[in-house]
Image (cartoon, coloured by chain):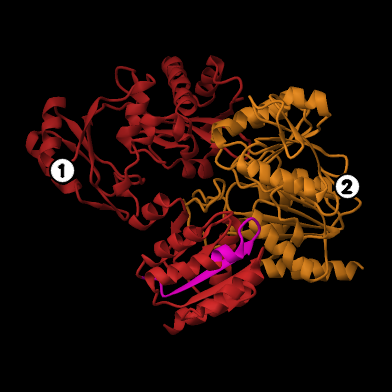
Chain colours: A red, B orange
Amino acid sequence: MDLLEYQGKQVFARHGVPVPSGRHAQTVDEAASAADDIGYPCVIKAQVQIGGRGKAGGIKVANSHDEAREHAGAILGMDIRGLTVHELWVEGASEIESEYYASVVFDRSAKAPLVMLSTKGGMDIEEVADSDPDAIARLHVDPLLGFQEFHGRRLAFEARVDPDVVRPVGAMLSKLYDVFVSEEATLVEVNPLIVTPERAVRALDAKVTLDDNALFRHADNAELRDPSAEDPQERMAKERGLTFVKLDGNIGILGNGAGLVMSTLDVVALAGGSPANFLDAGGGSKAEAITSAVEVILSNPNVNAVLFNIFGGITRCDEVARGLIEAFNQISPTVPFVVRLDGTNDVEGRALLAEANLPNVYAESTMDAAAAKVVELAAAS
Amino acid sequence: MSILIDASTKLVVSGITGREGTFHSLRNREYGTQVVGGVTPGKGGQDVEGIPVFNTFHSAVSETGANTAMIFVPPRFAADSILEAEDAGIELIIAITEGIPAHDELRTYTKIKQGGRSRLIGPNCPGILSPGKANVGIIPAAFFKQGNVGVVSRSGTLTYQIGNVLAQSGFGNSTIVGIGGDPVPGTDFIDVIGLFENDPETELIVMCGEIGGDNEERAAEFIADNVTKPVVAYIAGFTAPPGKTMGHAGAIVSGSRGTAKAKAEALEGKGVRVGRTPTEVAEIAVSLLGAAA
């Protein structure tokens, strides 16, 4: 789960990471009143979970009440790379002498937290990593030991930050590590981390990704999830306990097991088709889960054919067949279905389908044949 | 002697009194695995169809001589259970549980690695099957027979799919190892491929990868430097969009990293044959084995 900038800054503040003070706003009036209270100049910032807000015109400095109204009006409702702006963050403008970059990431390759610091702040760090890798100081932390003061000093000296801010930058890294561990984040990034003319160190931005699997231990963070920002179809799937990802094609896909579903998408694409979704009905899927999944798939109007690819292990093919028959009884789909049932109780499952004689349902025995068939049907309809 | 598990495996199951734990423990025993005990705090002294239940891993180990653990408890208790098994001196810990918090996995992984006495397989994996010898986990054994193909995979059902095509072509498996779909697997492709390389029963290795991380890329380097047996690979997720988790917590393309294409190219660059579909993987394996025979 990605936090919005202002949510990240609120989390930072709880852990003593210095951030500019600001206020959240959802209307022009709220933004103008926040700006009046904060004082001018202030910055009006679009709150969307995507980079490049500044370039898109989503971050503006206001020098007066009228300017605050004007900018808030322009930014609210703006489309930034496909996301509509519904929320603003208004904060006092900071004077900037230096811009640094700091982050704590979950390094899968090293299987350890990785802390990074660079004096090349304000830029895309992946570009810095490519063009000037030596400009980034890096250090892995033993998760059982935690971040020590010497880690902060070492990173600050190696990144060659201004000598007078080595200590506050080190302290900032220590607090960011604390956010990473205590909030169970997989990413904590500050870009830019600024040094003001008064030589204060502050986080001017906040990018925080939280581990969804740990939200049960963080009730306050779990509440930050914004269901309105989610795709309605993905939300519907989540409510039904299905693992679902929306894609932009026209062939609905259902399978059991993440790897098999991913593979099914690939095989359909190789056969010339375009999948409309990823849907993993999970291990041991019961009939009602299948019925529910069919409803989720068909709620996408682009879907004009559906492929069921089931290899039964714990999942029993007869249960899947019952679920499909039940779905047909309840919602009478108008698009063709191709069903491949293999594995546990496959003979029983296929017999049930044959007996039910559902309209527009085609049984195939292999994954490749099923993919070819569904692509043919989708193209014809 | 197969890798990791065989007739000498003495299994203790954490969460044996839960519905899934009971079901799969009994299935594993039925297959021939020695299931010597279970652990459920507070239920020590009870039994599950004759399998004694203990309050702690330590008592289970001292009473039964267990050397292998299977973790079946819910995610919030799983890291604690893995650490308890390690503390009790269990050599091989197989964690089936899906949805363990990433920081729990990080601490668990680090502790086990620093301890140097246990090996962790998973979490979020289907377990290990050595056909004809032992089954620890949830792999449906009926689809697999004894043979010379070693399989290591991040995905369960995909493994069944490939194993099934191989079986239909007349080939069986030495051992099938599910390393799991999480971001911090206790055991990597490299570890298992190294074991297969030294396993006299394995003549060909199939590795089944997917998007996310750089495990497959590092396996490619390892294979080029250390492996003499033929390796056939499959990578799932060519059509996965970046930034979306495809079911497994570990299956996500971040920026330009972790794509299926990059993984397939890394493997092919080191001479590993990569099948574009599960069927093609099995066909390549069959042609290589046929040529060797």
Judge whether residue A306 is colored magenta: yes
Q: Secondary structure at mark 2?
A: loop
Task: Specify whether residue B265 is in view.
Answer: no
Work out how far the residue at label 1 is from the one at label 2, CA to CA, in angstroms. Answer: 67 Å
Q: Which mark is residue B136?
A: none
Tell which subunit mark 2 falls on: B
Quadrant position of the C terminus of chain A in the picture: bottom left
Residue at 13 percent across and 26 percent down: it is A37
Tell which subunit mark 1 falls on: A
Q: Quadrant of residue B121?
A: top right
Which of discs 1 and 2 lies nearer the camera? The answer is 2
Quadrant position of the N terminus of chain A in the picture: top left
Q: How many marks?
A: 2
- Do discs 1 and 2 belong to a common subunit? no
Name the outermost residue toward the bottom: A380
Q: How far across and how far down the image is residue A365, in percent?
A: 64, 75
Is B93 left, or right, of A31 in this rendering?
A: right
Name the outermost residue toward the left: A66
Task: Give the extent of the magenta segment.
Answer: A302-320
Judge whether residue A106 is colored magenta: no
Q: How far across and how far down the image is residue A151, in percent?
A: 55, 20
Q: Report the residue marked by disc 2.
A: B198
Q: Secondary structure at mark 1?
A: helix
Q: Report the residue marked by disc 1.
A: A71
Q: Amino acid at mark 1?
A: His
Q: Amino acid at mark 2?
A: Asn
